[in-house]
Structures are given as structure tokens and as C-alpha cells.
């Protein structure tokens, strides 16, 4: 059944922040479906609400009104605890500044999400190894983040995002802190995850050349979507 | 030099930004210094009371080997033999200035604990008042020889219940009336109750025996003459000491004990305070890494960064030390307390915050500040210039 | 890796900082345990007091003696099981500085009143029958290296024999121990008769009497009856429980309890400030890391538990080290203190109190950081809208 339903259905989604007496509307009445296996790049100028939208998809922020439906079930009205459980099973996050635990080794960082599963120590080890191999950084498993380059750290972060086999990968400016060549490597890897492993990916970026790796680009401007076909 | 002051100023001005940690350091140093000062104030106060008690020109006669008045027994005949000893001073009438004395330990109720504690009820002869420096009746009058009247030391009034002027009081099966209070200027005798020797002998079945004889010497050196006389007299088996020596021997222990407890305790606490100071200074350097790097980039030396940190640490420690001195001085200086002294009776004394102990406290505080600041200071001096770009 | 790894890594995120905090905590618990042991030893007299044991002293003061005849009269009082008497000897061995706490007692009844003192049967027999026998407590015997069979003189700095000598010769015919290590054994006893008959003065007086009642509920009645019996005589008496008597004696030294409590309070206030503020700071530094954990799906409750566990570890490790050092020190110096602080050792009650304090301390210092961590909002922590 779920195969026929879109992975996400956003319905009339609005987000408003109040700052003092002023209330700022980030977006209003957004509607959007995300299908299984899609790779979407969300673009837009800063302040356009890209990250806020990503936060709604990831269940780390709740909308002011409207619904976020994931596999046919609303997640916007879940409690904090249920949301955390939902995230641990369904979402992999990739951040601009990697957000690795500085005190843990690469392998331990990757293992973190598995602590929330019932997997045995041996099984966890196997999965971590696989994930590190997929992102091509198995040789640095014992290194601390501090001992790794930016590109290497982002690989570890991607391994962490995929290790629990989530249904959606959410990436927020994943190459924002990297040089061009490294950025291309990382984006190539995301593309590979999408095409070869069938991972659904939503990526926020303001870099048009990064967006090119996605299957489709959505432009968020003044709180509204402007869809464009893939240019290349 | 100018850059040093600038950096120190920046450090010190940034203290409020780390209010929590800085207050923690100040308090920890303050508690450490307070513990030291508290114990030293007790020790110094006790010592002052004891040292103020003994005169060089008063000789104390006790039974040979008895060590303390409480253990001593002298016969009436002993007094007669001492009267004619050489070196004993006489008054204008030609009578020797001496007093045969006997004290019975009686129970008084301590105000602080409401429990019974030992007080000396001392029977004295008329000359006793001339054998204590600064003796004065501060209220009421002297007891009448032969009657059950008491004069009470001011220390006893402070620490014990029921000895106010005009009160009648039961000590054992006898009833007494308080007719006067006296002071000897804070010496051990202020912790005593005095009455007529004959009355004590009579009411407490002591016959004609006494415990001690005190006599004024013509000069401090005359004690040797007296000693020679006593040794040459076969009928006397006595120990002769100057009163100052007597008190020094009998009561040095408590002050020493207090110092021996106070110092190690505050040094152990100093280790804790040192850990706290170090921690605070590390946080200080951490939080200002970028600021330090910026200063270094524009040409300030590593040494100024080091000094800035060290002095911040010293300032915090000094504040803690000063706070402790102030609080202890206000709360404790002059406070009255009492403990069991050498005569197995209560000695009332006042806490004394002395200059010496204040200096000791400040030195301990500065030592903590110095040691706590030095390693973080080195770290500050070694901050990488690249830290300028850190966010 | 397990959750324990995460907790350990969090605690030792800055190794030096964690060590410094542990040192502070260790110091406070060291002070607590050592002073707690001292306080316990000071109060040993109160703690080992039997509830049905009473002490009768002269109402003037306990240092003033009373007639021997009182002993016989008190024996007749209803409700008493045993009564004995003792005199303070003021003894020393060879030199006045070698103070030996010695009592002249009635041999048989004294052991009846103090059943916690243990004397082997053949030594007990010798004690009851040998006039010049001295029985010595284990702690005192160890201090002077005395053993059964030794013949020693003890001098008194108070009493004299009729011949003018102040030395009594004794045969050590027994060494007594106690059931419980908190019962002092730092004194010696000998026959009252041997003492009394050789005295030059003050014969036929006793220092104080100790008696046991059939039941605690009879204490007041027995005490009143004894004191009434001697009312309006030259030597009135005052009878109190053994515990009250010991308590009053400790109070004579001053408010030791207040002094010790103040110092311990100062030590704990210090670490509370240092560790409390440092932990809040340390968790603030980790706001973003905690937000990442939450993003990954770690529950708030779990975060709270992890941070609180860190403060528990900190407190238990630091406190444990302090307690261990204190126990080591106390054991090391206990021997030297036996003569004036009998029963000085690390009491189990202090150890338990220390553990209770560690838990309390961990809760106090850990609660706010853990609560703050639990309430961290992911979106705010990442500083983006």
C-alpha cells in the first residue's frame, strides 16, 4: 500500500515565528508531495525558509498550521518523545558543519544512531563497517573528527545518516563548508546513494551547481514553490 | 608595561562575564581562609588569656610532684614556713604579700549548651587581689570574710547562668550570695568564683588544708632565693614555680592543638580551592581564546597574556581572602567561648583575629591564586594565532 | 560502544577539568570522613553508654568525692541490679608525662556493671583474688608494651601512701578487651581496698558510683530515690544516665560538634559552588552536541539520565577517592590517637553518610545541567530558523 502513497505529503503547511510583538511568516499554505526514490534540491535565497522546511520534514520543528504526512500518517501532531522515536527509525540528517561528536571516533559517531535500535554489538559493528565502506572512509574509522578533513568529516556524517537505513535523507547545505572538488565528491556520493541504493533525499542548498546533482529542483521564494525541471 | 596594564584591565573587567565560576573561586578561597582564621582566632584568644595570667614576680608553691593546684595539698604549717622565706615581698605594714588558696570544682550551667561544666570556687586570703594584675571589682563589693558570699569573674558571668549580682546560688548543699563581680583584664582568673578561704575549708570539709600558696616576690630573680630556701628546709616538700611558668606548662596544649588542627585543615581546603581556581582560569582562557589571539596578532606579547591571566587569578583569590577576613572579623572577633583548661575547670576566652593570622590567611589565598593561575597563564601565552579565525 | 561510553566521553570531554572537579570533591569528602571519624570518637562515650546504666556523683561536682558508706546504702535501692564504685587515681608511669588513666574499683561489681569488658576466666579469677592485681585495657597494654605477669609501679599525682610514697606496685594479672571496638580500653583498674588502706589522707571516700537498673523505665525513679536519700547531707548526690553524663563531659571541651560541622559545611559549600557552576558551564558548551543527539532520535528523558549519570560518576569517583584516602589516614594514625581518642577509627556509619552525601551532591549539582540539557530545543541550538 505504502508504495502507492507518496513518502511525504505536505498539506497547507504554514510556519510563523513571533519575535517580540512582530510575527514573521516564513511560508504559508505550502503543498507538496515527495515520492519514494526522489532526490530533491530545495533552493532559494537566504531567509526564504529552506531550512525551516527541512526541519518540518525531519520532525525537529512543528508547523504553525497544516499537516506533514509521512507514509500516510501525520507526524506534525506527534509528541516530542514519539517524534524522537520516529526520527531514529526514518530519518538520516546531514548538516553543513557535519556536527560530529568531537569526543568520539569516526566509527563511534557512525554507531550513535544504532544505540537507539535493539541491534547487538556485533551486528552494530558490521553495519558501521558497511556504512563506512560505502562512503569510502573505512581506513579512518578510529580517527577523531579533529583529525579528519572537512570532506572526510562529511563522509562520516553521511555514514552516520545511512547506517540505520532510514527512509529519507535530509541534507542541509551539505557542501556549504567544502571546496569545489570535495563538494563534487560528496554530491556524487549522495547521487549514488539515490540511484544505486534508492535513498530518497531532500537537500537544501543555495548553490546551483550542487542542485544539479538532484533529480529535480524546487525554488522556494517568499514562502512559495517555483518548480523547475532539471536543467541538465 | 602599558600593554600589560591594558591586558590586565581587560581580564579583570571580563570577570563578571564568568560570574558563576568567578564567584565559585572567590567563595572557595574565602571558606579556606575563614577556616584558617577561625582556628587561629581560637588559638590566639586562648593563648592570650593564658599568657595574660601569669606574672614573673608571683611564686606558686605546690606539693612536690603534684604538677597542678588540683592535685596539691599543703598544710597550715607550710604557709608559716613560707612566710619567712627570703625574697618574699611585704606590704606597707610589713606583712608578706601572700595568699593561701584552695579551690573546689563546682558545677555551673553553661549558657551555650545548657549542660553542667566545671568552675573553680576558689577560697582566697585578703592579699589575693594584690597578687593578680589589674584586679578590680567591676560591680557590687568584695565578699565579707567568714560569710557565704561570692565575687564572680566576668568570664563566668558571660558564659554561665545564674551568677548575676545579687543572685543566691546553690553549690552542692550550700547556698551562696553573689555580692560582686570582678575582672582581672581577661586572664584565666576571670573564669573563677572567689570567696573566703576559711568558708570553703569549712563548708567543704577541708580542715585547715590548702592547695597552693601564691606570694609576691621582691623581684622575678628572687625566685631562686625562694627555691634555695625551700630545698634547704627539710620540713617542706614543695615545688616552686613562677606563676608565668605555671600557666605556660599547664595550658600550652590547647592552643597548639588548635593550630595543629587549623593549619592542616585549611591546607587541605586550599588544594580544593586551588583546583577550583585552576578550573576557573582555564575557562577564562578558553572563553577568551579568540580575544587573546587577536591581541597577539596585533602585537601584544605572550607574556602579557600570561600576566593577564595570572593577575586575574590573584585578584579573585585576594577578593576571597579579603572577604573571609572581613566576615570572620565581624562575626568572630571578641566572641566569647570556653573550654576545659589545665586546672580541669572552664577557661573563658575571647576569639582574637590577630594581624599575624590575617597575613597568614592572605598569603595562603595568594598562594592558591598564584598556583591556580600559572598553568592557565602559560596556556594563554601559547594560544595559537590562528585562533583569530575561530568562531 | 554503549551508552556508558557516551557518558564516559561526556564526563572526560575535558580531562583536566574533570580531574580538577574530582580533586575538589575528593577533598570535601576527605574532610567530611576524617572529621566525622573524629566526632564519632569524641562521642564514643555517649554511643557506648548502656541505656539502663546510671552514674551517681557528688552534686557539687563529679570531681568531689563522697563517703564510702553511700555504696552500701545505694545497694539497697529497689530496682537496681548492680552497683559499683570507682576512684580517680591520677596515675602516671615513671614520668608525669606518661599519663595512665587508672581507677581504684570494687573488682567484682565493676565487671558486673560493665559486661562489655571481656577478661579470660583464669585472669578474671586472678583479678578477683589478687590484692595487688592491675588489669589493663588492651589499648593501654599495647601503648606501653605491658603483658600479663609484668610487675610495674604506678605513681599518683594526687594520692600519697601513709609512708609518704606516691608510688603503688602492681602485678598485671589481666588484660581486658571489649566486645566492640568503639568501647574504650585505654585505662587500667585495681582493687579499691589496696588503694584505700594505704592512703595517707581522704580514706573511705569514693569518687563516683555506677549502677544498672532492672529496666530503663525505672531510671528516673531510681535516680530520684538515690538523690533524695542523700539530700541535705554535706555530700548531696546527683544521679544521671551514663549517656547524659558523657554528653555533659564532651560539652565541657566546647562545642566540638559545631566546629566540626562548620568546617564540613565550608568544605561542601565550596565544592557545591565549584562543581555546580562548572557542570552548568560544561553542559552549555555541549548544547549543540546534545541537539545532534536529539536530532538522531535520543529521547529527552534519556539525555537527562545520561547527564545526571555523569554527575553521579563525578561525585562517586571523587567522593570515593576522598573517602578512601580518609580511611587510609585514619587507619594509619589511629594507633597514635588511641590514648586520648579511644576507639578512633573509620566508623561504618560515616561511610554510609558519605555515600548518601555523594548521591545528594550528585543530584544537586547534576539536576540543573541535566534539566537544561533535556530542554534544549534542536532548532534553537543550531541557531537557524
Image: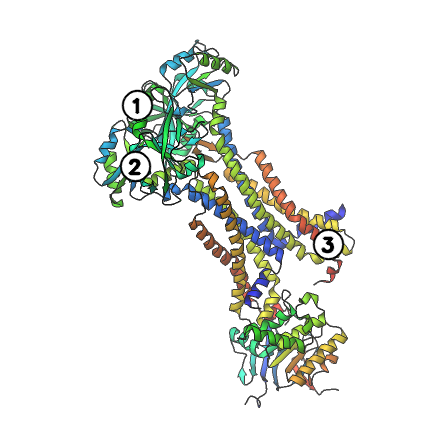
Image mark for residue B382: 3
Q: Secondary structure at mark 1?
A: helix
Q: Quadrant of residue C57?
A: top left
Residue A115 percent across, percent down from the top left? 56, 72
Residue at 25 percent across and 32 percent down: it is: C71
Report the quarter where the C terminus of chain C lies: bottom right
Q: Which residue is mark 1?
A: B203
Subunit of label 1: B
Circles 3 and 1 on the same chain: yes
Image mark for residue B348: none
Circles 1 and 2 on the same chain: no
Report the quarter where the N terminus of chain C lies: bottom right
Residue at 66 percent across and 48 percent down: it is: B373
Residue C268 percent across, percent down from the top left? 51, 50
Q: Is residue A181 left or right of residue C43?
A: right
| Nearer to us in this view, A97 or C100 | C100
Picture layout, residue B77 above or below residue B278? above
Amino acid at each position: 500500500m505504502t508504495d502507492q502513497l507518496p513518502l511525504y505529503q505536505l498539506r497547507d503547511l504554514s510556519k510563523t515565528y513571533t519575535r517580540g510583538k512582530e510575527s514573521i511568516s516564513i511560508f504559508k499554505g505550502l503543498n507538496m508531495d515527495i515520492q519514494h526514490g526522489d532526490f530533491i534540491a530545495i533552493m532559494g535565497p537566504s531567509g526564504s525558509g529552506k531550512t525551516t522546511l527541512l526541519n518540518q520534514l525531519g520532525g525537529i520543528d512543528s508547523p504553525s498550521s497544516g499537516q506533514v504526512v509521512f507514509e500516510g500518517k501525520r507526524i506534525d501532531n506527534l509528541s516530542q518523545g514519539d517524534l524522537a522515536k520516529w526520527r531514529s527509525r526514518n530519518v538520516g540528517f546531514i548538516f553543513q558543519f557535519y556536527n560530529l561528536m568531537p569526543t568520539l571516533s569516526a566509527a563511534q559517531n557512525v554507531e550513535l544512531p544504532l544505540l537507539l535500535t535493539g541491534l547487538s554489538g556485533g551486528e552494530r559493528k558490521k553495519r558501521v563497517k558497511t556504512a563506512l565502506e560505502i562512503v569510502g572512509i573505512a581506513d579512518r574509522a578510529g580517527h577523531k573528527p579533529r583529525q579528519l578533513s572537512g570532506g572526510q568529516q562529511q563522509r562520516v556524517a553521511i555514514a552516520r545518516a545511512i547506517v540505520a537505513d532510514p527512509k529519507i535523507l535530509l541534507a542541509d547545505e551539505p557542501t556549504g563548508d567544502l571546496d569545489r572538488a570535495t563538494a563534487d565528491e560528496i554530491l556524487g556520493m549522495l547521487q549514488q546513494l539515490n540511484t544505486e541504493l534508492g535513498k530518497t533525499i531532500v537537500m537544501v542548498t543555495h548553490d546551483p551547481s550542487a542542485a544539479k546533482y538532484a533529480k529535480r529542483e524546487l525554488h522556494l521564494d517568499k514562502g512559495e514553490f517555483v518548480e523547475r525541471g532539471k536543467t541538465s | 608595561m602599558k600593554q600589560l596594564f591594558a591586558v590586565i584591565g581587560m581580564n579583570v573587567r571580563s570577570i563578571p562575564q564568568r560570574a558563576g565560576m568567578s564567584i565559585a573561586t572567590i567563595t572557595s578561597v574565602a571558606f579556606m581562609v575563614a577556616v584558617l582564621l577561625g582556628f587561629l582566632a581560637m588559638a590566639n584568644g586562648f593563648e592570650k588569656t593564658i599568657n595574660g595570667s601569669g606574672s614573673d614576680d608571683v611564686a606558686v608553691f605546690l606539693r612536690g610532684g603534684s604538677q597542678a593546684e588540683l592535685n596539691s595539698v599543703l598544710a597550715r604549717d607550710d604557709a608559716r614556713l613560707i612566710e619567712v622565706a627570703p625574697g618574699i615581698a611585704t606590704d606597707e605594714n610589713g606583712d608578706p604579700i601572700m595568699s593561701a588558696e584552695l579551690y573546689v570544682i563546682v558545677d555551673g550551667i553553661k549558657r551555650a549548651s545548657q549542660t553542667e561544666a566545671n568552675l573553680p570556687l576558689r577560697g582566697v586570703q585578703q592579699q589575693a587581689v594584690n597578687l593578680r594584675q589589674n584586679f578590680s571589682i567591676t560591680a557590687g563589693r568584695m565578699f565579707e570574710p567568714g560569710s557565704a558570699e561570692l565575687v564572680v569573674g566576668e568570664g563566668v558571668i558571660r558564659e554561665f547562668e545564674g551568677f548575676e549580682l545579687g543572685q543566691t546560688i546553690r553549690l552542692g548543699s550550700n547556698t551562696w550570695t553573689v555580692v560582686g563581680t570582678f575582672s582581672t583584664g581577661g586572664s584565666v582568673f576571670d573564669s573563677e568564683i572567689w570567696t573566703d578561704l576559711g568558708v570553703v575549708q569549712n563548708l567543704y570539709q577541708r580542715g585547715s588544708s590548702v592547695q597552693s600558696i601564691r606570694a609576691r616576690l621582691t623581684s622575678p630573680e628572687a625566685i631562686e632565693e625562694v627555691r634555695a630556701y625551700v630545698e634547704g628546709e627539710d620540713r617542706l616538700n614543695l615545688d616552686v614555680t613562677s606563676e608565668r611558668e605555671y600557666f605556660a606548662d599547664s595550658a600550652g596544649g590547647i592552643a597548639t592543638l588548635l593550630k595543629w588542627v587549623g593549619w592542616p585543615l585549611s591546607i587541605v581546603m586550599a588544594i580544593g580551592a586551588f583546583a577550583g581556581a585552576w578550573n576557573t582560569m582555564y575557562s577564562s582562557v578558553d572563553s577568551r581564546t579568540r580575544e587573546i589571539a587577536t591581541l597577539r596578532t596585533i602585537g601584544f606579547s605572550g607574556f602579557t597574556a600570561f600576566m593577564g591571566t595570572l593577575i586575574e587569578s590573584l585578584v579573585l583569590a585576594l577578593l576571597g581572602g579579603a572577604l573571609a577576613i572581613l566576615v570572620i572579623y565581624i562575626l568572630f572577633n571578641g566572641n566569647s567561648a570556653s573550654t576545659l583548661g589545665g586546672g580541669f575547670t572552664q577557661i573563658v576566652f575571647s576569639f582574637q583575629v590577630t594581624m599575624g593570622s590575617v597575613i597568614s590567611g592572605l598569603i595562603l589565598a595568594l598562594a592558591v591564586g598564584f598556583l591556580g593561575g600559572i598553568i592557565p597563564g602559560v596556556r594563554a601565552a601559547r594560544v595559537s594565532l590562528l585562533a583569530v579565525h575561530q568562531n | 560502544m554503549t551508552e556508558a561510553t557516551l557518558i564516559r566521553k561526556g564526563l572526560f570531554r575535558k580531562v583536566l577539568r574533570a580531574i580538577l572537579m574530582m580533586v575538589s570533591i575528593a577533598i570535601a569528602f576527605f574532610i567530611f570522613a576524617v572529621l566525622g571519624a573524629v566526632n564519632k570518637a569524641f562521642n564514643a562515650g555517649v554511643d557506648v553508654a548502656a541505656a539502663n546504666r546510671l552514674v551517681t556523683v557528688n552534686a557539687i561536682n563529679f570531681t568531689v568525692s563522697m563517703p564510702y558508706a553511700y555504696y552500701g546504702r545505694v545497694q539497697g535501692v529497689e530496682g537496681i541490679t548492680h552497683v559499683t564504685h570507682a576512684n580517680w587515681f591520677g596515675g602516671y608511669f615513671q614520668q608525669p608525662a606518661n599519663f595512665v588513666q587508672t581507677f581504684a574499683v570494687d573488682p567484682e561489681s565493676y565487671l558486673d556493671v560493665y559486661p562489655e569488658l571481656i577478661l579470660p576466666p583464669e585472669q578474671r579469677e586472678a583479678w578477683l583474688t589478687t590484692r595487688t592485681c592491675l588489669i589493663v585495657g588492651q589499648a593501654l597494654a599495647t601503648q606501653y608494651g605491658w603483658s600479663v605477669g609484668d610487675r610495674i609501679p604506678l605513681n599518683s599525682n594526687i594520692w600519697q601512701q601513709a609512708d609518704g610514697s606516691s608510688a603503688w606496685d602492681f602485678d598485671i594479672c589481666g588484660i581486658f578487651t571489649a566486645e566492640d571496638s568503639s568501647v574504650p580500653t585505654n585505662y587500667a583498674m585495681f582493687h579499691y581496698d589496696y588503694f584505700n588502706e594505704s592512703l595517707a589522707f581522704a580514706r573511705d571516700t569514693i569518687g563516683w558510683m555506677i549502677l544498672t537498673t532492672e529496666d530503663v523505665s525505672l531510671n528516673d525513679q531510681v535516680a530520684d530515690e538515690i538523690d533524695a536519700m542523700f539530700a541535705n547531707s554535706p555530700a548531696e548526690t546527683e544521679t544521671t544516665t551514663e549517656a547524659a553524663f558523657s554528653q555533659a563531659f564532651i560539652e565541657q571541651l566546647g562545642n566540638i560538634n559545631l566546629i566540626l560541622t562548620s568546617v564540613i559545611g565550608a568544605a561542601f559549600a565550596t565544592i557545591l559552588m565549584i562543581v555546580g557552576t562548572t557542570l552548568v558551564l560544561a553542559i552549555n558548551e555541549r548544547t549543540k552536541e546534545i541537539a545532534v543527539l536529539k536530532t538522531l532520535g535520543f529521547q529527552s528523558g534519556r539525555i537527562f539520565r545520561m547527564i545526571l549519570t555523569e554527575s553521579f560518576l563525578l561525585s562517586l569517583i571523587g567522593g570515593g577517592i576522598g573517602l578512601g584516602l580518609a580511611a587510609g589516614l585514619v587507619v594509619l594514625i589511629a594507633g597514635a590517637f588511641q590514648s586520648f581518642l579511644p576507639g578512633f577509627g573509620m566508623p561504618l556509619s560515616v561511610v554510609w553518610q558519605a555515600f548518601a552525601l555523594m548521591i545528594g551532591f550528585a543530584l544537586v549539582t547534576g539536576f540543573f545541567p541535566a534539566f537544561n540539557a533535556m530542554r534544549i530545543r534542536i532548532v534553537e541550538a543550531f541557531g537557524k530558523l
